[in-house]
Image (cartoon, helix red, strand yellow):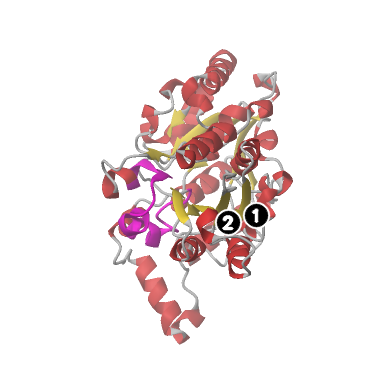
Amino acid sequence: MPMKKRIYAYCSHIRVFQSNKVLSTAYCKQFPGLSWISDFIDLAKDKDRSVITGDICLKKIINKEIKASDVIVIADLDSQLAKSLVSMGSKPGIVLCYESPLFAEKFYENAVDFCADYRAGILFNGIIEDYLPGKPNYYPNHYPSFSNDEIPADIIPWEERNELVMIVSNKYYRNPFHLKSILNPKDFEAWVRGKFKISSCSVKRYAMKNQLHDRRLEAIDYFCKKSLLDLYGPNWDNLNNLPLRWRTRLKNNIKKLSPIPCIDKKRSISNYKFSICFENAIYPGYLTEKIIDCFVAGVIPIYLGDPNVEKIIPRDIFIDMRDYNSWEDLHFKMKSIGKVEGENMIKSARQFLGSELGQSFTYYSHAKKIFDLISQ
């Protein structure tokens, strides 16, 4: 009797990741950390297996085109599509998390219950240590960030580089106050909860207390006034999503910087000596593509985020913002780094990328890890 053909269903609550759109390599390149799916599809094809998105899979099961029992679920966070497929008889394969607790608090809060049926998971280390200690086949997320063919053969000479770059979208961790908020009880309640960091979820309270959106805005304010910063990113043409104090403080700075969206992040930052790359929040293991992108591009990252970053990233290849008490101290450090030290840091970062640990951040390594775990 021939073996049943396995179907992997990638389930995300994000609509732009549905309708089989992520099956396109070109489409995935638009989103940080998503390009691993293309490598996963290739691995599946080699074993005569197929990949579809959860919404398409659900329709095919309802229309009796495929059997639910032939489907293995890949759940991105606590996707409702994943829940529906499992309830219909699909096999819960693996849980993935690429989002901070600032914006995925429900998943973090309910991680124990949601992950109970899944045999494997790739999550940020804080979730595993706090909620799933000792659970087998659950591994820290080395955020998929690059492919080896993206690394330029040569680095741009130090003296030909601009000083400082920052690529970040204009977003804030809580709703700002507007006069119309008073007229809408839900909006007013949301503002109060965000303003005073009120939440029934302990991990969300922790994340709000340790959010880094304000530190990013501080950096923009300081380095713009020093005429050192180039800023890229979407949605800076409207500051109404920011609190009033930041709208007032940054209004003239943003006009001066005239930020535009960045089409190719790694190529854009490669022309600079330094790049500010702060995470959304400080949380154990929450280390995303931001710092790895800098190593690939050949720029020195100024990093703040994962409190255990030095366990993964050698301290001599990045600037740790925790070492500096003020923006003035950081600025002095930047000025002290000359051509020899700067280019040596960049070369050492390239060596890190080529190491076994550095390679764990490649799209292929991430895809292979997921494939191996759900193929057991």
Quadrant in the picture for residue 344:
top right
Q: Secondary structure at mark 2?
A: loop
| Residue shown at 64% from the left, 41% from the top | 48
Residue 108 in the image: state x and y as whole percent: 36, 56
CA–CA distance in space, label 1 to label 2: 6 Å
Q: Cβ–Cβ below 8 Å for labels 1 and 2?
A: yes
Q: Which mark is residue 234?
A: 1
Depicted 336 relative to depicted 132: above or below: above
Q: Quadrant of the N terminus?
A: top right
User: From this viewpoint, is residue 259 visible?
Assistant: no
Quadrant in the picture for residue 272:
top right
Neighbours of disc 2 within 10 Å: few (<14), some (14-19), many (20+): some
> Is 8 one of the magenta-colored residues?
no
* Mark 1 or 2, nearer chain start: 2
Q: Which span is picked out in magenta? A: 98-127
The amino acid on which the numbered mark 1 sits, given as a three-letter code, is: Pro
Residue 171 in the image: state x and y as whole percent: 54, 58
Residue furthest bottom as drawn:
183
For the residue pair 282 and 227, the one nearer the viewer reads as 282
Quadrant in the picture for residue 343:
top right
- Tell me how many marks there are: 2
The amino acid on which the numbered mark 2 sits, given as a three-letter code, is: Asn
Q: Which mark is residue 95?
A: none
User: From this viewpoint, is residue 277 visible?
Assistant: yes
| Residue shown at 51% from the left, 63% from the top | 81
> Is 101 one of the magenta-colored residues?
yes
Residue 128 in the image: state x and y as whole percent: 32, 44
Q: Quadrant of the C terminus?
A: top left
Depicted 310 relative to depicted 208: above or below: above
